[in-house]
Image: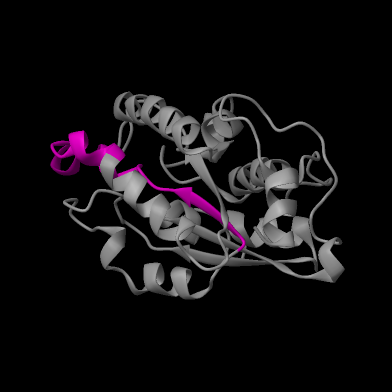
Amino acid sequence: MNVLNVLLASFLLSSPLAPAEPTKPVGPVNGGKILKVACIGDSITQGVGAAKGESYPAQLQEMLGAGWTVGNFGVSGRTLLKKGDHPYWKEGAYKKALEFNPDVVIIMLGTNDTKPQNWKHEKEFVADYTELVQSFLDLPGKPHVHACRPCPVPDPGNYGINEKNVQIEIKRIDKLAKDMGLGLIDMHAALADTPELLPDRVHPNTEGAGKMAAAAFTALTGKPAPEPAVK
């Protein structure tokens, strides 16, 4: 294990069931090496619903500062499931994320998988999620991977996306994160008490994306997000 991986394991690892304990930030250590973060996801990661340039990865970049480079590899409408209607696996963004050879990976997929046409393949969710995680763990840089609990879906949902199936996914993601030793970022809790920040009941607005960025910041650094968390 190289020095960077030791540092990542020491500084970035958070409990799959609770917030990370406060630690020192990673960016300034290891000879000033800039750490690369790959954000994997669907339209919520891409930034649909937030103002232009204010996706959660963009706001996370601002919070983390110059010691980090955050890449947004989100693609609208994409599923984790390989048999979903629009699998993330087939996207050029997935290939680019692998080529990015990140030090840290944040995966937030599953929202579109709750749609009826995709949920019929739900028994394959854990296997497909495990394979996606492993594809990043196998990279030369051996990145630290964080799985995300998906954002809440206020009733009655929209576009076929629904909270009932999100809750089922959360239980599976929690177990997978524990079994694989992954970090866990609770995007669901970050927005659970503020449904008004999801105007269409799926996509967080700019302020909601800021709360997501704050949750990711704390998971990556062990520190509270800087104020203000959003512009």
Front residue (pair 185, 54): 185
Can you give x and y, in whole percent of width and height, for residue 136 in the image? 45, 59
Going by the image, does 131 lie left or right of 124?
A: right
Q: Is residue 42 visible?
A: no
Say left or right for 231 vs 150.
Answer: right
Left or right: 11, with 178 as reference point: right
| Numbered marks: total | 0
Residue sitting at x 61%, y 44%: 212
Residue 220 percent coordinates (x, y): 69, 47
From the viewer's perspective, is 220 left or right of 156? right
User: What span is in magenta?
Assistant: 103-126
- Colouring scheme, one of rainbow, by chain, secondary structure, one colour: one colour
The percent coordinates of residue 190 (x first, y second) are 60, 33
Q: Which residue corresponds to the image point at 79% horizontal and 66% vertical from the top-left?
A: 67
**Could you tell me which residue is drawn at 77 percent across and 40 percent down?**
222
Name which quarter of the figure residue 10 lies in: top right
Q: Position of residue 31 (x, y in %)?
A: 86, 69
Q: Residue at x 39, y 59 (%)?
A: 135
Quarter occupied by residue 64: bottom right
On-image quarter of the C terminus: bottom right
| Residue 166 included in the magenta stretch of the image | no
Does 56 appear above or below 219? Answer: below
Q: Is residue 82 among the parts visible in the rendering?
A: yes
